[in-house]
Structures are given as structure tokens and as C-alpha cells.
Image: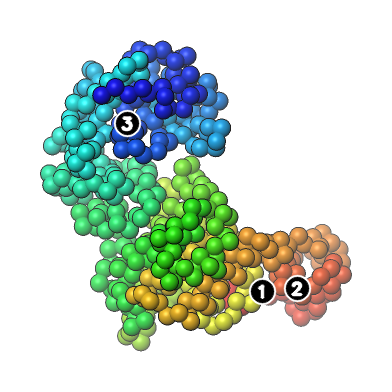
Amino acid sequence: MILDWSSWLPEPVVRALHARRGNRGLWLVGGALRDRLLQRSLVDLDFAVERDARRLARQVADSLQAAYYDLDQARDAGRVLWVDPSKTRWTLDFARLRGPDIEADLRGRDFTINALALPLEPDARIIDPTGARQDLRDGVLRACSERSLFDDPVRALRAVRLAADLGFRIEPQTMHQARACASLLGKVSAERLRDELFRLLALPRPAAAIRVLNHLGLLQPLLPELGPLKGLEQPATHVHDVWNHTLAAVDALSNLLRVLGRRYDEEAASELALAQVVLRLGRFREPLSLHFERQADHRRSLRELLFLATLYHDVGKAHVSPANGKARFPAHEQEGAKIVRERGKALRLSGEEVDRLARIVRHHMRPAMMAREQTATPRAVYRFFRSTGDAGVDVVLLSLADFLAKHTPPVPQEAWARHVDVARLLLEAFFEEREERINPPPFIDGDMLMRSLGIEPGPEVGRLLDALREAQAVGEVGSAEEALALARRLQAQGGAGEAGDGG
């Protein structure tokens, strides 16, 4: 099978490869060819190089004015991260051949559908030593050999992700290998487990893959805190135990992100509860898409972090004592925040990511409480975002998913309408009225406050400034003079005190 590679790779990449390497000892390999044959879009390109792979990668990065990273010095592997003129992000990985020739390299790969290569030369024919094209036609995920997954246990996780992503079935022997690899995952570095987990969370519907991981025994070594949720009963207001509720919440979040995504999903929005979401929250589609595309750290989006937080939002229920001997779990969100913080650290997430996960889990119940108690006042909205920051957007979506996961359709319409209205108020405040309602430019600063009140630097200054900012956000002060007058009253009363989380 002949493929004209230069006609479907980005033209700047083609130029860079020609200029720096010509046509010698260079192959396009793996997932890019697989996706091309499946007529899927491409943004990740893998290249096998006869020699000097990192040197070539640096040269290509220079040609593209892109970023370069060493992936593995011992294996002579490097990565180029390039943003094309249309703002599409591309990843180009270059690695030295793993074996004496390209066929040996391909036979040592993970799955047959990734064991493809195309020489970057005119009239090139695909090299397919393991029957990849037949497996692609049959929709089968098959290990390249009886040792493929044992040689690298992370491939067991990758098998689940690829099968879910492509809609393929895992053939029985490969399934057996994956199950047997569960005990070996403890020997894999946290960074590699993390990266494969986040690729799985990037799937449109990650709950399906999570279920397969659990079935194969691969979830316990990856996210061990989720195990005790299985069979943990909940109050009668819930239709599921905690484990199945968690999976239902992940599914519900996928549906919410589909109907509130940049591309409107008419089929998903036909369900009544989601139709109400589109009607009341549809105007936030673009800012929500931009928000969840943001990256808290290298190549990990806020969307993927939110799915991890959703998996852990009720994890604290297995660690608190039921109230009055009943299946109620007071303060489980506080315990859950501690647990997800430790899991984030164990996965070697950045400090920013760990803090964000903990904030989402810690505050995931607040929008529901505001809806139930009808306390979505301007002060409650301000205090919500004071506690959550921009992670408040994530909390809003998780709270909606949490509500949907408690019920079988149709959900209670009156309660759902109140919940969606609270979500609208919170998103409106964040995306449309942030300077007025969440982070107003202060009328006075700390220096002015200390001069006017004759106080020294210290905690009292911070408490007074916090109180003034809240008063300004809720419309109780409208000028510097009114702010100073309120500060004097608060000082006379003994300081600003500590503002709570309520409304």
C-alpha cells in the first residue's frame, strides 16, 4: 500500500524533515499511520530514526521555531512541541530504532495496530510485519507478542485506553496479559502511570475505560483509594452505592461537557435534563470550552483534572463514620480533599494541580446546598469563588454531574431547575461580571487603610481588606469614602472577624 506522506503531513514539517534529513533512515511509525488508515485526525507524529534521533529532533524544532524536550537520553529520544498557524498543537516524537532494523523495531512494539512504518521517501509502501492492517479492518486490539505487555506493564493500561478510544475489542490472549500485569504496575514509575491515566481521562467518555480497568484488576494499583467505595451503601436519596454513583457522575460529566462543548451535540441534548442545561447555560459554551482546554501543567488540561476530581469527589465517604448508624457521611468532602491531595502528590502532579483537585473535592457540595437552601445570594456567590478561585467553574460542573448521578431519569424537575439556576448565577458571575461580583478593583489599598485608621501592618489589615472587598462585591460600599467608613466601624467592633463559607 503506497501512501503519499508529504500530502497529508503539515507542510512546514515536511520542509523541516527534508531540509534536515533528506530521505535517509527515517520512518513515520505507530499511531499516526494507524489513525491515517482509520481516517482519524492527526496531531501526534512518531518517527523512528536510524541514528542521532535527538539531534534531528532539535534541528526540526529549530526549523519550526518550536519547543524541544529530551524524552530519554539512553534511548536517544526527543520531543518537539509545535503550534501551527491555525493554533493546533502538534507533538513530534523522534526515537532511535529499537533493534537492528525497522522490522525488528516494529515487532518489539506494543500492539499490532501500532506496528506500522512508512519510509519518508517517494512512493513509499507501508511496512506491516504483524498484520496490523487486518486487525484494523477487524477492529481488534492484539499484542505484538506473548511478552509485549509483560515487557512494559504500562501497556496494559494503554490497551484499555486504545480499545475504548477506537471502539475495538481486546482479543482474549491480550486481555489475559493485561490482567496478569496488574501486579507489575507497582514497579512502574509514578510519572508513567500518571501520563497514561491522563490520556485515558482525555477520552470523550472515560467512565467506560475506568470500568474495564476495574474489571481487569488494573484500577486498584493505579487509584487504590477507589476500591473501598464498592458496595458502600448510601441514603435512600441515592440510587447507587458510592462506587456506581461515582461512575455515573463521570458519565454525567461527559454528557454535560458534550452539550456545553464548542460543537453542539444535538443528540445528547435531546434528554430532558440536558436540554434544560443547554437552554439555561448554553451561552457559556465558548468560555467553558476555553476554560477546560487550559493546561494546569504540561499537557494536562483542566478537563482531565476535573475527571480525576470527579472520581475522587466521594472518596472520603469510605473514611468517615456514618452518622447515627445510617448511611450518611458528614464532612466526607473534607476528608476527600485530603485523600485526593495525597493521590495527586503520589502521581507527581504539580503543586497547582494538587491544590486544584483538593479545592474541587472540598467544595463540590456547595452549589447543591445553595440550591437546596435557596441561598444563592450575592454574598454567597462571592464567598464561593473566594474559596474556590477559578476552580469554582469546575465545581459547578461537578455539582451538576453529582446531582444527575444520584437519580435515574427523569430527575426531580423542580430540584434540578433550582440547581441549574444556581449554576447559571455562578457562571454568570465568573464569566460575565467577575470584576463587579468576584474580584472588584479595590477602592483602597493597605497603605491607605493603615494611614486612615492609624494601624500597623499585621493580620488585622488583611482581615479588614477582605471584609471591604466582600462589601464592595455585594454592593454595600460604592466609594473609597464608604469603604473607609465601614473599616472604621469594623475596627470599633473589634476587627473584621473571619468570614465563613456560607451565604
Q: Which residue is mark 2?
A: 475
Quadrant position of the C terminus in the picture: bottom right
Q: Which mark is residue 429?
A: none
Q: Residue 495, located in which quarter of the rendered image?
A: bottom right
Q: Which residue is mark 3?
A: 33
Left or right: residue 95 compared with residue 382: left
CA gap between label 3 and label 1 equals: 54 Å
Q: What amino acid does circle 1 point to?
A: Pro
**Earlier residue among tags 1 and 2:** 1
Horizontal and vertical percent position of residue 174: 16, 43
Q: What amino acid does circle 2 point to?
A: Gly
**Earlier residue among tags 3 and 1:** 3
Q: Residues within 10 Å of mark 2 (few under 14, many from 20)?
A: few
Q: What amino acid does circle 3 point to?
A: Leu
Is any part of residue 110 visible from this angle? no
Q: Secondary structure at mark 1?
A: helix
Is any part of residue 266 visible from this angle? yes
Marks 2,3: beta carbons within 8 A: no
Q: Which residue is mark 1?
A: 378
Q: Residues within 10 Å of mark 1 (few under 14, many from 20)?
A: some
Looking at the picture, does residue 42 appear above or below residue 23? below
CA gap between label 1 and label 2 equals: 9 Å
At 20% from the left edge and 54% from the top edge, which residue is drawn? 216
Horizontal and vertical percent position of residue 205: 36, 55
Q: Secondary structure at mark 3?
A: helix
* Mark 3 or mark 1, whichever is nearer to me: 3
